[in-house]
Image (cartoon, rainbow, N blue to C red):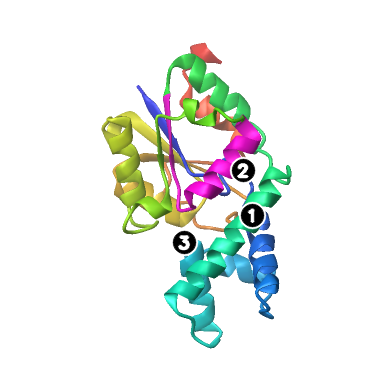
Amino acid sequence: MIKAVIFDVDGTLAETEEVHRLAFNRAFSNAGLDWSWDQELYRRLLKVTGGKERIAHFLEIFEKPPMEAEQIGALHKAKTAVYTRMVEGGEVSLRPGIPEFLDALRERGTKLAIATTTSLPNIEALLSSTLGAHWRDRFVGVAAGDMVERKKPAPDVYDLALRLLELPAGECVAVEDSRNGILSAKGAGLRVIAVRSAYCGADDLGGADVVLEDCRGLGLVVLPKSDG
C-alpha cells in the first residue's frame, strides 16, 4: 500500500520552466548583461540542476568572463525575485489533473511531501499562488535544493523527504518529470511515476516504473480502483 506520494515541483506540479527562463533573462537584462537564453539553450541547461549551478555552467561552456560565487548568488537571488513576482501575478497554474489528484490523496489520507531542486522561495511563491496561503497544511514535509548538500541526480533531497515523512521508501512513490529526478528518487529506493513535461519531454524516462504522457492518469496509477 502506498502511504505517501513525494512530488517534484518544476515541470511536475506545474509547467514552470518557461517562467524560470524568462525570469533568468529579465534578471540578466536588469544586471546589464547581454545574455539571452532561448528555449533550445534552456533545455540544454536544464541538464544541470540548480539555478546557481546552471549559471556557472553557462559561463563555462560559453567561455564568458568568470564570476565569483557571491556574484552568481546575487544574480540568482535577483532572478528568484523576478520569478516570484511573475508567479504571484498568476502566470503559472498547476498542471491539468494535479489539483484533483492532490484532493483525492488528501481524502484518502495519503501523506504528501515535496522533493525538489528549486529553492524554498520559489516553492512558496508557486504553491501559495495555486493552493492558497495554507498550502503547507497539505504537505508533511518540504525538501528543497537549498536544504541538502547535493542536488539531483544525487538522492539527498529524497532521502530528506523520507526522513520528514518518517516512512520507508518501500511505502512511498515519487512523481517526477526528468531523468535527473528519476535517478535521484531511484537512488533513494523509491518507485517512480514519470510524467512528460514541456521542457523535459524528450528526456529518457526509461528508469521510471511507470511513464505517463500527462498528469491526468496519476490517480489511475496510484489510487485503488475502489477510490476511482
Q: Nearer the viewer, residue 143 or 192?
A: 143
Q: Which residue does the numbered mark 2 point to in the structure image? A: 14
Mark 1 = which residue?
83
Residue 20 lies in quadrant: bottom right
Q: Element at badge 2?
A: loop
Q: Residue at x 37, y 39 (%)?
A: 191
Q: Pointer 3: what residue? A: 49
In the image, residue 125 lies in the stretch drawn in magenta: yes
114 and 40: which is toward the camera: 114
The residue that appears at 61% across and 43% down in the rendered structure is: 14
Residues at badges 2 and 1 in contact (C-beta under 8 Å)?
no
Question: Which x, y percent locates residue 113?
Answer: 42, 34
- Give, as a single range, the part of the protein colored magenta: 111-131
Q: Compared with residue 188, is residue 60 higher up or lower down, i.e. above or below?
A: below
Tell me if mark 2 has few (under 14), some (14-19) or many (20+) residues whose alpha carbon lies within 10 angstroms of its own: some
Q: CA distance from mark 2 to mark 1?
A: 14 Å
First in residue order: circle 2 vs circle 1 = 2
Look at the image and say whether residue 21 sits in the magenta stretch.
no
Q: Residue furthest top?
A: 226
Residue visible at 66% across and 57% down in the picture: 82
Residue kind at label 1, given as amino acid type:
Tyr
Residue 160 appears in view? yes
Q: Give the SS element for disc 1.
A: helix
Residue type of the residue flagged with mark 3: Thr
The residue at 65%/67% (across/down) is 27
Q: Are marks 3 and 1 in contact (CB under 8 Å)?
A: no
